[in-house]
Every structure is written in structure tokens, then in C-alpha cells.
Amino acid sequence: MSKTRSPRAFAVELLRLIACLIVIGVHTLLPYSNSDAYKFWHTFLSCLVADGVAVFWMITGCFLFKRKVMTVWKHAIRTIGLPLVIATCLGWVLSYNQAPGFNYSDFSALKNSLFCFAPAVPGMTHLWYLYVNLFVLALFPLLKLIVTWIDLEKRRQLLFVLVAVLLFIVNDISGNRILQFGFGWNSGFIPAIIEMILGHLIYKYLRNWNSRKPSIVFFLIFVITNLLRATVFLTASNNEPSNYHVLYWYSFFGLLCAASLMLGIFSAVNCVKTQSKKNKPIYLKAINQRCVQTVYILASYSFLIYIIHYPLLIILNGMGFQTWVETTLLPINYGFKQEIQYWFSMVTIVFTLSLLVSYCIRSFFRWVVSIEYQTYFLQIVKAFCRWQPIQNILVGYETQ
């Protein structure tokens, strides 16, 4: 991570951090039960944290199509492929040894994960995102040609947006039966590509909005869309309980929510930057600078946190920690207020623990690299830690 960044880059880093928190939020929600299966506010909360992955796709699109093909492929192997293999192997070790919360799996699960391009190891299913990412980046030469052609005329860009929106709407109306979007590489790459290209267009044209009104409007669109989304889900679920696709990132609601959140963050950050040019007390400027640096640091850990948080959550659940938090914060007949308190607590705990584990991993590798050569074994470890792909993992998956 560079020491100096442009204000637009800060908006992207802030958005990356928010997306990371959203992903943790969706994994720490209370499950539906027979007593509250269709509570509106519970569903609304689920909708608010449903689109972290869509935001990540759009962030990737901000800078992806400016790069050369070989650069993207090398970057994908170093910062996605290698972490995927390491995380899968470590997850299998936890599963094979039946770590708390992990179901047992034999060697076939590891083999299927590595060679069948699907997350088969228990507790590591969240790595589907990396599989989809690799597949999409493998198609990058074709995608770059398409985006270059779209960028030639604004009419083509508008046509792409309209066709993409119409495609999502028609698929939602069909109950996801037409395109059958999902969480696999073969069912997730189409919506991922669309959202990447939309992220590219948003960043290209709308990243410099600095008025306060657009940011408020976009945040209102985000909230209102999720209210409508919860209503549609409950209405559809009353007729067909399996109709859950509207809650996911590959629905039209997910597309609109991710775009509105991205635009809201861009316009809000640029509005604050414009106002900060005026004379302010020194201590306020210092506070602002500390906040900016904190966002940069936390966002740099987002990729490691994404990999670590889910197995960490499973281990906490297997140790009974999550149940203890539920019994401590939630009464027998709890309401939405108590559920919010529990959810905020779990997001804070899981994020903090994942950040600490990520920091320890990165610090360990940096310590090994910094110490003097002493033994032959230490030379091997130090060379491994200095290996460029390992350094890329420790820095985190950044698309800039």
C-alpha cells in the first residue's frame, strides 16, 4: 500500500472496508426459526447485509480494465490462486482433525476442492468467491475487448446498463429459473462480470460527485430498496418458501443496492474533501488524517479477514461461544432491538478476532524476513517469506 493516495482511492478503500463488514454481518445473522421465519425487520436486516460480495465485484471493476492481460493473470495467480490453495489445505487440516465446529472430511474433499474447482472442504465454502474470481479473470482478454468496445460510445454504455438491469429483473421474475445464478464458478461468473463492468462505469463517470444531496439520495435508495426487497421476499415466500434468491447479491435488488451504496460513499467522501479545504483547527485536521490512515490500514487486511472470518466463526460456534453470546444478550422472547444488539456484538467480535489473527500472520512473516540468517532451515523459511506471492497475500488482495 502506498503512503499517499488520492481522495478517490480513499473512497474505494472505505467501500472495501464496509463490504468486508457486510460479509461478516451476513454470516453472523441469527438463523430463521419457526417462530420468526417471516418477521419483517429480521428480513430487512438480512437484506441490508446481503450485498457485500456485489460491492467487492464493483470495486474490482474500478481498476481492473486499465491493466494488461498478463499483469492481471500474474496478479490472479499470486493473490487469489495461491491463497485459495493455502486456505483450502489449512481448512482441510482443521476438518480432518475435527477442530471445534468442523465436520470430518477425508482426502477426497481436499482433492475435489483443488481439482474440481468447487469448495468441498467443510467450513471453507465461503471460498466460492475466489473460485468465481479466478474464472472471471481467466476470461479477462475477452472482457477487456468487450469493455473497450463499450467505452467507445456512451450509447453503448447506456445500452449495456439497460440490458443488464433487464436481465436481472427478468431472472428475478422467473424465480431465478432462467439463468440460475448462484455461488459456484459456473453460476456466479455472469452476475460477477456484469457488476464488475458496472463498477467500471460508475468509477469512470460518477466518482467525482461532491454534493451532499446525491449522497443522501443514494443512501435513501439503498434503504428503500431493501425495504421493498424484504416485502417482495415475504410475499414470495408465502407462496413459495424456496424463493430466496431476492436476498442474494445476484438479484436486481442486490445490483441496485450495491450501486447505490458505492455512489453514496463516493459522493459523501468527495463532499467531505471539498469542505475540508476550508481553514480548520489543526487538531481537526490531525483527527481527519488519523481516520484516513486507520481506514487504509484496516482495508489492507480485508482479504485476509475474508479468508479467516468464516472458519473462525465456525470454531467459536463449536466452542459454544456464539451460544453463550445468544443466551447472554437474547431473552427467551427477544425482539428486533435485542437481535440488533446481538448482531453488532458478533460482527465486532468476529471482525476484531479476524483482524488480530491476520495481524499476527502478517507480523510473523515480516519477523522471519527481518531476522538474520542462522540455520539452513531458517534460510529456507526466510526465502519462503520473501517469495513475492507470499508477500502479495500478506498485503492483501488489492485491485489497484
Image (spheres, grey):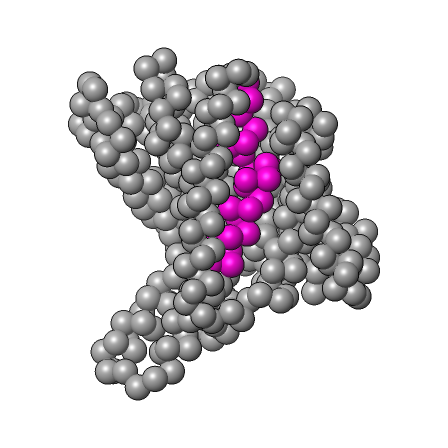
Q: Residue at x 44, y 44 (%)?
A: 224
The image shows residue 396, relative to residue 325, as above or below, that is below
Give the mark count. 0
Q: Residue at x 60, y 60 (%)?
A: 202
Magenta stretch holds residue 60: no
328 shown above or below 76: above
| Residue 154, position as x, y percentages in the image | 74, 64
Q: Is residue 8 visible?
A: yes
The front one of 301 and 106 is 301
Of 352 and 61, the residue lying toward us = 61
Instruction: Determine the residue located farthest toward the top in the rendered image.
Output: 34
Residue 250 among those drawn in magenta: yes
Identified at 66% across, 38% down, the residue is: 168
Q: Which residues are magenta?
A: 242-264
Image point (63%, 66%), residue name: 204
Q: Nearer the viewer, residue 120 or 374?
A: 120
Quarter the C terminus occupies: bottom right
Mainly helix, strand or loop, the magenta region? helix
Quadrant location of residue 230?
top left
Residue 238 vertical position relative to residue 343 in the rendered view, above or below: above
Q: Position of residue 7 (x, y in %)?
A: 47, 72
Horizontal relation, residue 24 to residue 197: left or right: left
Left or right? Give the position of 311 relative to 384: left
* Residue 131 in view: no
- Image coordinates of residue 335 in percent, x first then y, are 24, 27
Q: Position of residue 328 (x, y in %)?
A: 18, 27
